[in-house]
Amino acid sequence: MTIERAVMTTDLVRAIWCRELGRDEVGLDDDFFALGGQSVIMVGIQRAFIVEFGVEVPIDQLFRNPTVASITAYLQSQQFATQ
Amino acid sequence: MILRGKRAPLPAQPVVHRRFEAHAEANPEAIAVCWAGERLTYRELNARANQFAHLLLERGLARDGQGQATKIGVCLDYSFDMLVAILGTLKAGAAYVPLDPAYPQERLRLLLGQIPGLAAIVASPATVDLVDVATAPILDLAQSAGELAALPATAADVTVTGEDVCYAVFTSGSTGTPKLTAVRHENWFNLLNWLQLEYGLGTASNNLVVSAFGFDLSQRSLMAPLFCGATQYLLASRNFDPAMAYRILRDQDIRVVHCASSTLYVLVDWEVAVKGDALTRLDYVLFGGEPLHVERLLGWAGQPGNNCTLLHQYGVAECADVATSYDLAGYRRGEHDIAPVGRPGYNTDIHIVDEELTGVSAGESGEICIAGRSVGSGYLNGSGPESARFTAIEVDGEQVRLYRTGDRGYVTDAGELIIQGRIDNQVKVRGMRIDPHDIERALGRLPGIQQAAVVVVRTDAGDCELNAFLVPTGAGLDVDEVRAQLLKSLPRNMVPAGFRTIAELPLSPHGKVDRAALLDRLRTVASI
C-alpha cells in the first residue's frame, strides 16, 4: 500500500481531534483526558490517522502525547526520521 | 429452572500448570510465547518459571507462618516476565493477583491494601513506582536475574491440589470497595478443559491477548494456549493497541482471541477500515462481558468466506469467568430480541431463582445463579454483604453450593440463557463490572462536591457511557478540575465521560437517588 503521506500539521491533527471528541474547538495544549477523552475515542483518532493519512500511530504514543501539539511533534519527528 | 452442563471427568488433581508442564516435557522446542519480536520455547519458559518458583520457596514467600499459600501480586506489563511470574507462582504453590501497572498510584494503593496474605509484589521499578504504596516486598526480576539463573531449572517438589487457590482478581463490590475473588485450580482447570474439548483447541490454537491484565478474562486468555500446547502472542504495548494487534493477527498464525464485546467492535471496525480479512481467518473469538450490540457484528460476521466462529459467552469472575457459551451463527434477527449466551460449560449448572432462592418455571425471569465445579472459593477481603452471594440451596434433597450473580435472565424454549441486566445498580462498561457507588465515593472525597450520582447511558453505537451529576457545595465548581482529580484516583474506564452540575439530586418516593430521572435529564439535554 503506497499512500502519499501528508506532512502532519497541527491543523490536520486538530481537525481529527475536534471531530472525534465532538468539540468545535480544541486548544493546542489541551489535555485529551481533561477534554473528556476516553480510550474508545483515542482508538477512533488512531483509526482516522490510518484511514485518512495512511499513518499508523502506536496507541501508547497517543497516550504519551495527549495534546494536539505534542502528538503533532511526535508525528513530524517520525515522518522526518523515515524520509 | 435448571440448565445443566455436560458432566465431564477431570483428573483427580486438576492442577492447571501441570498441563503446561506436560507440554514442556512432550514438545520442549515448541514456541510457548512470542512478544516484542522475540520468542521463548516451552522448555525455556518452563525453566525460567521453575527458577522463579525456587526463588519464592527459598525466600519463604510461597507459604505463610501457618503453612497457607500466600498471594503474589504481579504488577507487570505483558512480557515474558509476566508469564514467568504467573507460572512460577503457581509452581511454588502460591496464588497470583494480577495488577495493572497502568493504574493510578492511588488505585494501586487501595488494591494492595485489600490483599490478605500478600507476600511479594513482582514489579519493575522502571515501569511502575510502588515504593510508597507497596504493602509487601517488591521483587524485580531484572534485578534478581543473577540469583534466578543460579537456581535449578527443574521443578521444585511442591504438592498442589485442585482445592488450592491459583489466582484472585478484583471485581466491583456493592460498598465501593473492590472485592478480591479467589479462583481454585479445579475451577480454572474445568474452564480450560471445557473450552479445549468442546471447541477442539490444540497445539495449533495460537492465541493473541488483547485485554488488560487485571481483567478476569485475561487470566484464561493468558493460560488457554499454554494449557493446549499452543503459542501465546503478547502485545508489546501498555494500552490495548488495535493497530498493533491487527498487524499481528494479519502476519502471524493466530487462531483464537478472547475479548470483551467492545474490543471485538474495535477490531472489526479496524478490519473494515483497512479492508483486511485477518479476523475472518480466525477459528474463534470468545467474547462477552457486557450487553451485546449485535448489529455491530452481523454485517462483518455474515461476509462470504468468514471462517471465524463467534462465541458469545457469559460468566462472572467469582466462578472462573465463563459459565455459558453460544455460537452466534445461530442468532436470527427477528427470532431473538437479545443474542443468547447459550448453554452452560462442562460440570456447570445455571439456576434461575426468585427472591426466596426457589427455582422459577421454564421461561420465567429470575436471578441467575451458577453451580458446579466452576464456583470459586469466595472473597478474600472482608466479609461484606457480597459474601452472602455464595450460598447453598436444596435441590432434590441435596445441598448445592451456588453463587448468586445479581444478573437477571431467563431460559428460552430452545434451552438457551438470555441475560436481561442487573438486579442491582452495577453496570458493565467495556467489559469491566463497575459499581457507580465506587465512583460516587471517589467524587465525594473531592473538595467542592457535596453529593454525586453516576448513571450509565447506552450510546447509539452500543457503548456504555458513564455520566456524573454533581451537587457543588458552593459556586464555581470547575468540572475539568474534577475530572483531572478523578483521573488520579480511578482507572480511566471508571472516569465518567460527562459531568454536569445540578442543584440537588432528584429522589425516588423511597428517598433514594432517582437514577431514571437523571437519565431522562440526559436525554432531554441530548435532544436540544
Image (cartoon, grey):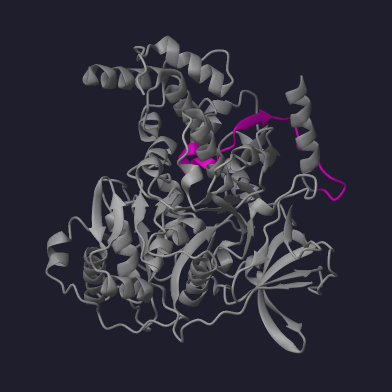
Taking the view exactly as shown, the residue that stands out farthest to the right is: B509
Q: Is residue B9 left or right of residue A53?
A: right
Q: As rendered, which of B431 and B293 lies closer to the eye?
A: B293
Q: As rendered, which of B197 and B21 lies closer to the eye?
A: B197
Residue numbers of the magenta segment: B487-511
Residue B170 visible in the snapshot: yes
Picture quarter with the N terminus of chain B: bottom right
Which residue is located at x 56 percent, y 36 percent? B447
Taking the view exactly as shown, the residue that stands out farthest to the front is: B305
Q: As rendered, which of B437 and B273 lies closer to the eye?
A: B273
| Membership of B494 in magenta stretch | yes
Point out residue B151 in the picture as x, y percentages from the top left corner: 15, 72
Residue B490 visible in the snapshot: no
Relative to A35, residue B246 above or below:
below
Q: Is residue A52 left or right of residue B353?
A: left
Residue B2 location, quadrant: bottom right
Total numbered circles: 0
Residue B351 location, quadrant: bottom right
Relative to B513, residue B170 above or below:
below
Point out residue B517 in the picture as x, y percentages from the top left corner: 81, 37
Point out residue B506 in the picture as x, y percentages from the top left corner: 80, 38
Residue B377 location, quadrant: bottom right
Which residue is located at x 37 percent, y 74 percent? B19
Q: As rendered, which of B258 and B380 lies closer to the eye?
A: B258
Picture quarter with the C terminus of chain B: top right
Point out residue B326 in the picture as x, y percentages from the top left corner: 64, 58
| Membership of B159 in magenta stretch | no
Q: Main secondary structure of the magenta part?
A: loop
Which residue is located at x 44 percent, y 12 percent? A12
Relative to B190, residue B293 above or below:
above
